[in-house]
Image: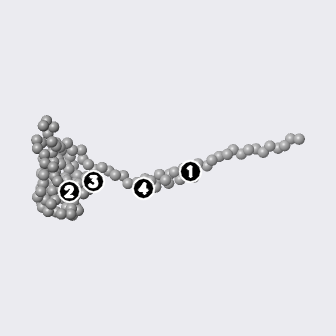
Amino acid sequence: MQFKTEQEEEVHINLTPLIDVVFLLLIFFMLTTTFVKESQLDINLPQSSSQQKLKTDNVLRIDISAAGEYAVKIPGAKTSKSLINRTEDTLMRALKDAIKASSDRSTLITVLRADGKTPHRAVVMALDVAQRLGLVHISFATRQNSKQ
């Protein structure tokens, strides 16, 4: 006697729900991840034969790149914040915010870190804005001459 053999169905795994879940997780992680942009400018400081170390935590730092781009580091912050453009108004607003964030304005020291190839115009503009905001303790950052 011959028995009818049942035809075996091919087993298919439906991957559509798995792909949907993977895409949803991808979207979730893309939206919830914070991307930290280090906004430090590439600065090559000019050399100096003497160097003085600042012994205060109340330092407002203005970085100026060789291209004339600005970044401001608020006292107590870990990184500097790049400015969106090179205009005087943008620099003025950034310095005002930094002064407001400072605990004691009277001991606030402004340090200009300008690249050796920074246009003179960019440094003068930073000095002018700082002077108009009443920042009187201003110094220039340099690196120690390596020949000594």
Residue 18's mark?
A: 1
User: Decide: marks 1, 3 in contact (CB < 8 A)?
Assistant: no
Count up the numbered dots.
4
Q: Which mark is residue 57?
A: 2
Q: Nearer the viewer, residue 9 or 63?
A: 63
Q: Is residue 101 above or below residue 29?
A: below
Residue matched to label 3:
78
Residue at 20 percent across and 42 percent down: it is 44
Please state, as top left, top right, bottom left or bottom right, where the N terminus lies in the image.
Answer: top right
For marks 1 and 4, the one nearer the N-term is: 1
The mark nearer the N terminus, 2 or 4, is: 4
Q: From mark 1 to mark 4, how far is it between C-alphas? A: 20 Å
Q: Is residue 37 left or right of residue 5?
A: left
Question: Disc 3 to disc 4, how far (Cα)?
Answer: 24 Å
Query: Looking at the image, which residue is at 12% across and 42% down?
Result: 48
Q: Could you tell me if the residues under marks 2 and 4 are in contact, i.e. CB atoms within 8 Å?
A: no
Percent x, y for residue 112? Answer: 16, 51
User: Mark 4 falls on what kind of element?
Assistant: helix
* Within-10-Å neighbours for mark 4: few <14, some 14–19, many 20+: few
User: Residue 90 is drawn in which quadrant?
Assistant: bottom left
Callout 3: SS: loop
Structure colour scheme: one colour
Who comes first in sequence, dot 3 or dot 4? Answer: 4
